Image (spheres, helix red, strand yellow):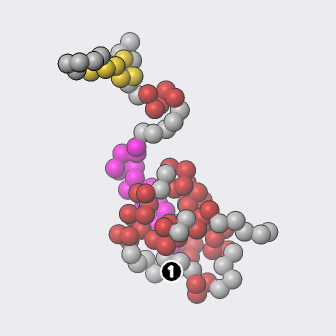
């Protein structure tokens, strides 16, 4: 069935289970570069549509995006409106890069 892969070594026998992460549900598969770029572009566009802020420091924001887990990326994009809606003064709205690096999307707000 091709599920196991024998890796030749001189001293020991090394067996690898192909696509182990997918079988175990860990989801450790890294997104392809195109998927990563598309997800960042979608976040970048959405963040600035909601906040109406200047599109600055895209390089730093892209680096911060790459450091996030898949779940954190999902939360970061989903919670932009909640973050912006809870600002007391929109003058203090963070740049996208700071929003990501500070993990502001994980903040909890009182209702």
Tell which of 15 and 83 is nearer to you. 15
- Nearest to the observer: residue 44 or residue 68: 68
- Vertical order, 5 against 64 (above or below): above
68 lies above or below 10: below
Image coordinates of residue 33 in percent, x first then y, are 34, 50
Magenta stretch prevailing secondary structure: helix
Going by the picture, which residue comes out furthest to the left? Answer: 10
Q: Position of residue 106 (x, y in %)?
A: 62, 62
Is 14 positioned to the left or the right of 17 in the image?
left
* Residue at screen point 38% across, 12% down: 1
Horizontal side of residue 37 vs 104, given as left or right: left
Let me know if residue 53 appears in the view: yes
Residue 96 in view (yes/no): no
- Seen as rendered, the residue at the extreme front is 11
Q: Measured from the top left, where is residue 39 in percent x and y?
A: 45, 55
Q: Residue at x 55, y 65 (%)?
A: 103
Q: Position of residue 64 (x, y in %)?
A: 43, 63
The residue under label 1 is 53
Q: Quadrant of the C terminus?
A: bottom right
The span shown in magenta is 30-48
Is 9 rendered above or below residue 106?
above
Please give the name of the residue rendered at 51% of the width and 36% of the height, measured from the top-left corner.
26
Is residue 12 rendered magenta in the image?
no
Residue 34 relative to residue 88: left or right: left
Q: Quadrant of residue 19?
A: top left
Q: Nearer the viewer, residue 80 or 5?
A: 5
What residue do we see at 44% from left, 60% from top? 65
Q: How many marks?
A: 1
Density class for disc 1 (Cα within 10 Å; few <14, some 14-19, many ≥20) is some
Residue placed furthest toward the right: 111
Helix, strand or loop at label 1? It is loop
Farthest residue to the top: give it.
1
């Amino acid at each position: 069935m091709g599920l196991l892969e024998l890796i030749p070594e001189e001293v020991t026998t090394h067996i690898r289970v192909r696509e182990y992460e997918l079988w175990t549900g860990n989801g450790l598969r890294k997104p392809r570069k195109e998927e990563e770029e598309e997800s960042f572009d979608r976040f970048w566009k959405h963040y600035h549509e909601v906040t109406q802020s200047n599109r600055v420091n895209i390089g730093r924001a892209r680096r911060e995006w790459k450091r996030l887990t898949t779940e954190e990326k999902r939360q970061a994009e989903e919670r932009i409106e909640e973050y912006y809606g809870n600002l007391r003064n929109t003058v203090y709205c963070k740049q996208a890069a700071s929003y990501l690096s500070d993990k502001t999307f994980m903040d909890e707000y009182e209702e």
